[in-house]
């Protein structure tokens, strides 16, 4: 018996929404290879995305079809609602073979269903849909017409259901505990890797009600001279004294992420650094004041940009992105962005990570906020205070 995290009715509504979007785009069969989208449509959840796998959605078929490595079919049975007839494993001799490719198997499966001449949608920009996979699928279906369907599912996912928001709030609670663990652990004489271990321990434990999971990327620890780097890997150096420390991390519940970044200062921060942190906080508050259904992504970013401009500050990169289900390598949903020129309208149920980071020439500050768009404004997903955290 499969253990499902959502009611069958919710999965049915997701599939129906995808099929409606496929019809609008003139797509008959959709080959979904992004793990986040496979999970969204079926519940399939395994660390198997290093091999070729797919969920196939066809307008003519009531339910999706899972296709993947034979040994992972067990997980398809245990994590999805799909009946056995809709689970199609390929033999192991397709794996990392110089003679066979799993997309040949998937293409043959599509052809055997009578869809060999249909319009096939594929996620061209998906992290796990390689050029080789596309070439082999085309070779297996020479009479089909292929169409790019990148982000088709992602744009459906951008609005969360109440059950999804429940899991995201649980992820946010785990995140807040991770922040507390960082506060309790950070010290000039401990190594970055020891701090990471303390954070990850809480990430994996979760809460009494919801166990944790690894996030799509490891916590980012940007200490001392590396505080001006947005995405460094931690090392075994001691944190040191009188130094800034930026940490980006996310609690996870059933693959739903609740990201946060917080800036810590070990010692007594210079007034100029405290002022910089406060200006980031003020910018976030101004941007959040704009959030409501009907507001655009660029309007939210404009409030942030206008606030920072009072002090001659500017953030070159975007202010934020939607988040939700995530597997490696990112917890961003790859759709809208909080940036100038993005006219996407906010809808109730969207969730964004407002990534308010300033990376200067010699230092950086990252005090961010993940928020849910509500009917009347916003709800903060994490509750950790937006402030510079000083550790004496």
Image (cartoon, grey):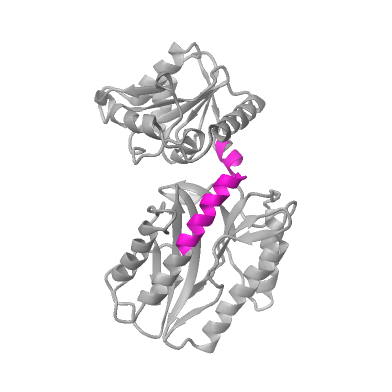
Instruction: Identify which residue is drawn at 60% across, 59% down.
Output: 371
Tell me where residue 112 appears, x and y as whole percent: 43, 11
The number of numbered badges drawn on the structure is 0
Is 158 inside the magenta-drawn segment?
yes
Vertical position of residue 341 compared to residue 193: above or below:
above
State the extent of the magenta-drawn residues as a range: 153-175
Magenta segment: does it hold 144? no
Residue at 35% x, 75% y is 185
In the rendered view, tell whether residue 266 sits above or below residue 59. below
Q: Quadrant of residue 16?
A: top right
**Is 311 situated above or below 254?**
below
Q: Quadrant of the C terminus?
A: bottom left
Q: Position of residue 51 (x, y in %)?
A: 33, 34
Image quadrant assignment for residue 391: bottom left
Magenta: main secondary structure equals helix
Residue placed most toward the observer, 112 or 292: 292
> How far across and how far down the image is residue 72, in percent?
32, 32
| Residue 82 at x, y percent in the picture | 45, 26
Q: Residue at x 55, y 73 (%)?
A: 385
**Front position in the image: 309 or 114:** 114
Residue 22 appears in view = yes
Residue 140 can be seen in this image? no
Q: Which quadrant would the N terminus be assigned to in this image?
A: top left
Relative horizontal placement of residue 154, taking residue 3 as reference (left or right): right
């Amino acid at each position: 018996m499969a253990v499902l995290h959502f009611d069958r009715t919710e999965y049915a509504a997701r599939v129906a929404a995808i099929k409606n979007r496929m019809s609008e785009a003139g797509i008959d069969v959709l080959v979904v290879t992004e793990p986040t989208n496979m999970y969204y449509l079926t519940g399939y959840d395994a660390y198997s995305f290093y091999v070729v796998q797919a969920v196939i959605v066809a307008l003519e078929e009531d339910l999706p079809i899972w296709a993947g490595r034979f040994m992972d079919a067990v997980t398809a049975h245990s994590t999805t609602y799909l009946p056995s007839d809709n689970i199609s494993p390929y033999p192991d001799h397709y794996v990392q073979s110089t003679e066979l490719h799993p997309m040949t198997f998937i293409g043959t499966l599509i052809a055997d269903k009578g869809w060999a001449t249909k319009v096939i949608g594929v996620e061209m920009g998906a992290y796990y849909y390689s050029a080789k996979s596309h070439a082999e699928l085309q070779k297996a279906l020479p009479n089909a017409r292929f169409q790019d369907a990148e982000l088709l599912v992602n744009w459906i996912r951008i609005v969360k259901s109440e059950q999804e928001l429940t899991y995201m709030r649980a992820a946010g609670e785990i995140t807040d505990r991770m922040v507390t663990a960082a506060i309790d652990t950070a010290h000039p004489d401990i190594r970055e890797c020891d701090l990471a271990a303390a954070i990850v321990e809480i990430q994996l434990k979760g809460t009494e009600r919801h166990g944790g999971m690894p996030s799509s990327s490891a916590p980012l620890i940007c200490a001392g001279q590396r505080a001006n780097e947005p995405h460094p890997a931690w090392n075994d150096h001691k944190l040191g004294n009188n130094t800034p420390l930026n940490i980006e991390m996310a609690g996870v519940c059933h693959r739903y992420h609740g990201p946060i970044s917080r800036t810590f200062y070990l010692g007594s921060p210079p007034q100029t650094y405290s002022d910089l942190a406060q200006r980031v906080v003020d910018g976030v508050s101004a941007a959040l004041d704009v959030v409501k259904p009907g507001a655009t992504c660029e309007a939210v970013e404009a409030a942030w940009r206008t606030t920072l401009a009072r002090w001659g500050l500017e953030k070159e990169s975007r202010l934020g992105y939607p988040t939700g289900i995530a597997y490696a390598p990112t917890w961003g949903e790859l759709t809208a962005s909080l940036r100038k020129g993005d006219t996407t309208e906010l809808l109730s149920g969207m969730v964004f990570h407002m990534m308010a980071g300033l990376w200067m020439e010699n230092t950086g500050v990252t005090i961010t906020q993940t928020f849910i768009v509500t009917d009347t404004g916003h709800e903060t997903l994490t509750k950790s205070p937006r402030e510079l955290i000083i550790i004496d």
